[in-house]
Image (spheres, rainbow, N blue to C red):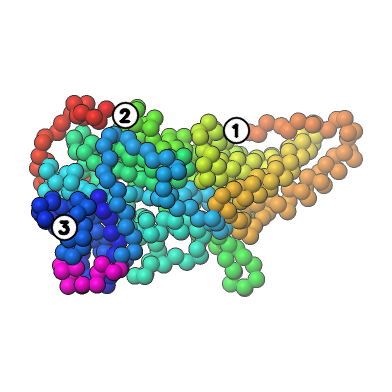
Amino acid sequence: MLTLHVKSDLQFEGVFVSGNLSKSQFSLVLNRFDGFLCFQLTASASTVLLMLLLVSDLFGDPLLTRHLVDIDSKPARMGCVVSTPKDSGGNRRRPGSIGEVSVYVPGLRIPKPVDFAQSLGDYLSKNIVERLSAHRTRIVVMAGQEGPTITRTKRKSITQHGGSTLADLLQALEDYLPVLLGLVKDGNHLQYKIQFAWVNQEDEKEETTMSNAWYEVLSVLQLMATLLLSQANLLLLPRSSTDGHQLKVSEENRRASVDIFLKAAGYLDCAVRHVLPQLPAELRRNLPVDLAEGVLRALCLQALGQGVDIQLGMAIDSTKATLAVKRRLACEMVKCWQQAQDNIMNLPLANGWGEKHCLFVKWKYVEAKAAAYYYHGLILDEGNTEKSHGMAVAALQAADEYFKESKKLCEAFNGALPLSRNPPLWGTMKYLSEKIPKDTSSKVRINRDLYSYERIVKTAPTLPDFSLALKPDEYQLPPVDSSWRTENIKGGQTDPHNLKGDK
């Protein structure tokens, strides 16, 4: 397989060429995306030069071969699962810095080229093969070009044809999914015919290849959720207000981000509940840690936790929200981050992005506890007994200690590669960074004046337990693309357990 990304101004939708050249079988898929011709070429090494000449002649551009900007040549590999160690090459490109982070966004998993014609040409019509190739090639080119930079917090990311890079890539994935699902409909035996390869980010293995289309579906959903988290991060970076003096996040952006968090959580929840169970147990064990059930569940809970954080910030700004409402939101936030930490604490997330992921969850969990103990302490202080006042002091002291610990964890997170930095404080933590130290000091002094030091409670009271009000969006996999309705699959609906080499 040879993939060529060629810079060109030629205009066309998609071309598929196959035949016999110099006694060598070949297939060639060309697609246009964002100013690039993407060639997916299957041919022997001796045929490559002749194929380039054919392409030049096809488009009347004798200089076409001078504009190669990326070449990726790798032989096809046999077997159900192939993992490439981290020291095997340069496929995994990581930025040294990702800028400001309000929302943790794992590094994008990047798909590697796939030759659908070679794997499916004997089973499917030319139309379906071309549609699969065209959709996936667009994603390969876009993710390959933008993936290494898309997680950086660019305030404005615009493609040369207009529009957001994030939105364009997300749309490409949404367009691909209904066509892809035809490969797994009703136990279609073709789901085992293609080796799908993706470059990992949080796993030690640089890339993982699996001969199962459900692995591709899982990878697509995870990437869709990741893109939404990146979108939310951009929305939640403070910008200059209309008066030009104060950096803030608009209420419109905050409300939009909650919707995005719930949508991302919906993708991840669907992946865990409806896609992972489709994979055999052995394949699930061999999934990269990026796609491990614990990591997917953690990302889902993180999205919910950050959604609750936004709600708490809006409650703080509201004159109508009571202390009880704020405490409940803070306690729900604690539950989200605690469950997220429980899901990843025993996973081998120690490789670059993985270490940063763990630190982010730990930081946000401790930060949430600071908020919850603060509001719990204020409510306890409204009591009329010596005991309630003593418990209030203990809760506020706990809030102060957790707040100090969260600042240390924040520094550790930003110092882990890839480097990051905090945006200017806003929302929940801007308010609490001022109120926690001040109110804790005040309440401790007042209560110590009223009661003897020995009567002050030393242990923080238990936080109240609330069920989570925020739920992931109900996302369902889309129906199979209509182009599959008239497809007559050659070879029949084979029982996957009877396929050799696919167990």
Residue 26 x/y as whole percent: 15, 52
- The residue most toward the front is 46
Percent of width and height locating residue 258: 49, 51
**Which element is circle 3 on?**
strand
Mark 1 vs mark 3: which is more N-terminal? 3
Residue, x 10% and y 39% (percent of image)?
A: 490
Judged left or right of residue 230, residue 379 is: right
* Residue at numbered disc 3: 16
Q: Please state which of the two labelled residues, at mark 2 or mark 3, is closer to the viewer.
A: 3
The three-letter amino acid code for the residue at tag 3 is Phe
Q: Using the image, determine if residue 9 lies above or below residue 404.
A: below
- The stretch in magenta equals 55-67
Q: Nearer the viewer, residue 339 or 113?
A: 113
Q: Place residue 479 in its image quadrant.
A: top left
Dot 1 amino acid type: Asp
Say whether residue 100 is magenta: no
